[in-house]
Amino acid sequence: MTEEIIKAITEAEAKAAEMKREAEEKAAHILAEAEMQAKRMEESSAEVCKAFLDTQIKNVKVDASRFYDEQIETRKKTAREYCAKVLENAEETVSQIVGRILRGNR
């Protein structure tokens, strides 16, 4: 009877050891799968972030170029108006100077 109890305990211990080993193997496999999935997610997220950054940079460049072109056109218009005004005023002054020179009035 004692031998049977010892044998049952030994078998139970062996069974428990086998169950523990299987559980540890399963846990290691689950951990490895989780690490692989996390790595894939990290790589995917990095690609998405890079694509988003590239898109934002392109959009900013387009906006900056558009703003630059608008500013150039505005400044050209202002410069043309200023030049026309200066030339308009210069014509009278030049006429007075030429008249003085030709008439001898200084």
Image (spheres, rainbow, N blue to C red):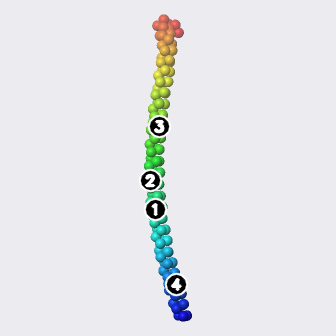
Q: Which residue sits at x=44%, y=55%?
A: 44
Q: Nearer the viewer, mark 1 or mark 2?
A: 1
| Amino acid at pointer 4 | Ala
| Image: 70 above or below 1 | above
Q: Looking at the image, which residue is at 49% across and 15% down?
A: 88
Mark 1 crowd level (few <14, some 14–19, many ≥20, 10 Å Cα):
few
Point 47% across, 47% down: residue: 53
User: Measuring 50% from the left and 24% from the top, which residue is drawn there?
Assistant: 78
**x, y percentage for residue 19?**
49, 78
| Along the viewing direction, whichever of 55 and 9 lies nearer the viewer | 9
Please name the residue that numbered disc 2 is placed on.
47
Please tell me whether mark 3 sits on a helix, a strand or a loop: helix
Which is nearer the N-term, disc 2 or disc 3? 2
Residue 24 locus on image (x, y percent): 50, 75
Residue type at mark 3 is Asp
Can the viewer see residue 94?
no
Cβ atoms at labels 1 and 3 below 8 Å apart: no
The residue labelled by disc 4 is 12
Q: Which residue is mark 1?
A: 37
Q: Which mark is residue 63?
A: 3
Three-letter amino acid code at the position of disc 1? Gln
Q: Earlier in the sequence, mark 2 or mark 4?
A: 4
Judged by depth in the image, the label closer to the viewer, 1 or 3, is 1
Q: Earlier in the sequence, mark 1 or mark 4?
A: 4
